[in-house]
Image (cartoon, rainbow, N blue to C red):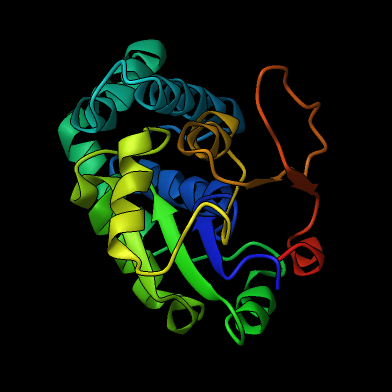
Amino acid sequence: MAYQYLLFDADNTLFDFDAAERNAHLQLCRDYHLAFSEEGYQLYHQCNAQLWHEFDLGRCTKEFLLVERFRRYLAITGEKADPEALNVAHLRALGEGAILMPGALPLCRRLAEDHQLYLLTNAVASVQRQRFARSPIAPFFRGVFISEEVGCGKPSRAYFEYVFRAVPGMTADNALVIGDSLSSDIQGANNARLPCCWFNPQGLPRPEGLRIDYEIRTLEELLSIA
């Protein structure tokens, strides 16, 4: 066993966040009588992704981005709605979308036999707790660390130091960070001087300036690493 402790990202690593987000947006448009189109959804997705990137860089708070993404979206589309109400409804719908990535369930079941699994996420606590509780992978995890509850998030070193204090026996030699986000998961592992595995199903080019110890295209490939 190379790594006893496996620190998994949640969204787009184990959970298919893109699918859940699209479903939530479709439901939101229906409930609030907003126009839905693929072009419109991509506009929302761009607003949302940009703000989460700014959050990862420490340029905005999570509370700001959750509402601001809808303000920006409405400003572009010209539609009228309360951005705060849209956010509340969106989070409620998103919490119901516990859609797993291909291979996530058998992977977690297998790894939990001889590893300790933990979930590390910057997502909204109420959404993540609800989705995780609904998910069949929940029994295989020893703990969940959500940035809102920790008081700081990935990629800060303080976040990983909190996890280390909470998990007895975990060291920089026996723990592996697994995630899809370069700015959050991989940068966070670099900041905390932890080994990391980049989940890169799209085959994106490796960036310069980041240490990536392992790279996988499918979750199943992790079995040969961990």
Residue 112 seen in the current view: yes
Q: Which residue is drawn at 36% across and 56% down?
A: 164
Residue 92 seen in the current view: no
Q: Is residue 14 above or below residue 23?
A: below
* Observer-nearest of 111 and 4: 4
* Observer-nearest of 92 and 113: 113
Q: Residue at x 65, y 25 (%)?
A: 210
Which quadrant of the view contains residue 73? top left
* Observer-nearest of 186 and 213: 213
Q: Which quarter of the image is occupied by the N terminus?
A: bottom right
Report the label total. Answer: 0
Which quadrant of the view contains residue 101? bottom right
Left-right relation of 214 to 41: right
* Observer-nearest of 22 and 114: 114
Left-right relation of 54 to 124: right
Q: Residue at x 23, y 29 (%)?
A: 67
Q: In this view, does 223 lie above or below 76?
A: below
Q: Is residue 3 above or below residue 172?
A: below
**Residue 29 rendering spot, x and y as whole percentages:** 38, 41
**Residue 31 rendering spot, x and y as whole percentages:** 30, 48
**Residue 124 rendering spot, x and y as whole percentages:** 29, 48
Residue that extends furthest to the bottom in the rendered view of this protein = 113
Q: Which quarter of the image is occupied by the C terminus?
A: bottom right
**Residue 157 rendering spot, x and y as whole percentages:** 37, 35
Q: In this view, does 184 lie above or below 105?
A: above
